[in-house]
Amino acid sequence: MLDKIRVVLVNTSHPGNIGGTARAMKNMGLSKLVLVQPEEFPSGDANARASGATDILENAVVVETLEEALTGCSLVLGTSARDRRIPWPLLDPRECAQKSLEHAELGGEVALVFGREYAGLTNEELQRCQYHVHIPANPEFSSLNLATAVQVLAYEVRMDWLARAGQPTKQEKLETTAMLDAVPVTADELERFYAHLEETLVQIAFLDPAKPRHLMARLRRLYGRAGISKLEMNILRGILTETQKAARGELSQRSTD
Ligand code: SAH
């Protein structure tokens, strides 16, 4: 799923920041880097700052325009160091991660777009993005280093991805629930269960038929609330049958005493 999220750097001046971005991405499990007109690339500085993430640099795609960088993307998020440059739907990094992974889960391609070190993204570039993302930094000093900004967003993407990993997808959840619960127990099955329950409770002397004290009404209320499925009903009936067998065993043992 993380392979559906690409990082786009626009007109980066310092190759070191491209290397730092590659490292930040690889640390967080992102792999697709697209560079729009980088000033200097490939570069020794980029490789040095990438540490072991040179594979991300080797596979980086270099293009001439932002439009080319966004090919195939159905969700584009543009970052901005300044809060509310132009009125636009604004997300924080956590919301950005959520949106990105929701989108990727449905099979869409996502771009996280980062601007120039000195001038950020132009208004025109920002208007190509459905959402703007602002890291809520100190308003007196809100501009992060480019690779650091990438790190913050990539970290949130990873956290959201980890929270989803191992959790069934919406579709799987629906299927599991459907299998277990799509077949609810019928009213007459429920009545037979209550009769069986009452018989068992009398048998184990939990219920005194002479002094029932609303026990069955209370149990009906409890089981009624549970929305029991056919599968669960089989389990409950099985427990009662075994309880009765055990109780009979105990009785016959006692009678031999
Ligand atoms: N002087 C520029 C700063 C650009 S910083 C400006 O005012 O726009 C370089 C890039 O890092 C930005 O274009 C953006 O992609 C990212 N960045 C830096 N600080 C950020 C923040 N607080 N929120 C979101 N992105 C930020």
Image (cartoon, grey):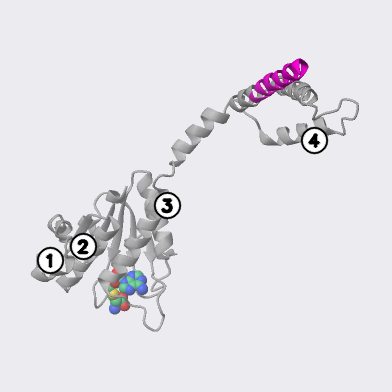
Q: Residue furthest front?
A: 257
Question: Alpha-carbon distance for marks 3 and 1?
Answer: 32 Å
Quarter containing ligand 1? bottom left
Instruction: Kindly identify the amino acid type of the residue bearing the numbered disc 1.
Output: Asn
Q: Is residue 189 above or below residue 100?
A: above
Q: Which residues are magenta?
A: 239-257
Residue 38 disc label: none
| CB-based contact (under 8 Å), mark 2 and mark 3 | no
Q: Nearer the viewer, mark 4 or mark 3?
A: 4
Q: Which residue is mark 3?
A: 163
Q: Nearer the viewer, mark 4 or mark 1?
A: 4
Instruction: Kindly identify the amino acid type of the residue bearing the numbered disc 2.
Output: Ala
Q: Which residue is mark 1?
A: 47
Neighbour class for label 3 at 10 Å: few (<14), some, many (≥20)? few
Instruction: Kindly identify the amino acid type of the residue bearing the numbered disc 3.
Output: Ala
Question: Alpha-carbon distance for marks 2 and 4?
Answer: 63 Å
User: Is residue 256 located in the magenta-colored stretch of the structure?
Assistant: yes
Local SS, label 2? helix
| CB-based contact (under 8 Å), mark 4 and mark 1 | no
Question: Alpha-carbon distance for marks 4 and 3?
Answer: 40 Å
Please name whichever residue, 101 or 242, is drawn nearer the observer in this view of the structure.
242
Lower sequence index among marks 2 and 1: 2
Please name whichever residue, 18 or 241, is drawn nearer the observer in this view of the structure.
241
Please name whichever residue, 88 or 154, is drawn nearer the observer in this view of the structure.
154
Lower sequence index among marks 4 and 1: 1
**In the shown orientation, is residue 167 left or right of residue 196?**
left
| CB-based contact (under 8 Å), mark 3 and mark 1 | no
Lower sequence index among marks 2 and 3: 2
Q: Which residue is mark 4?
A: 218
Please name whichever residue, 71 or 233, is drawn nearer the observer in this view of the structure.
233
Q: Which residue is mark 2?
A: 22
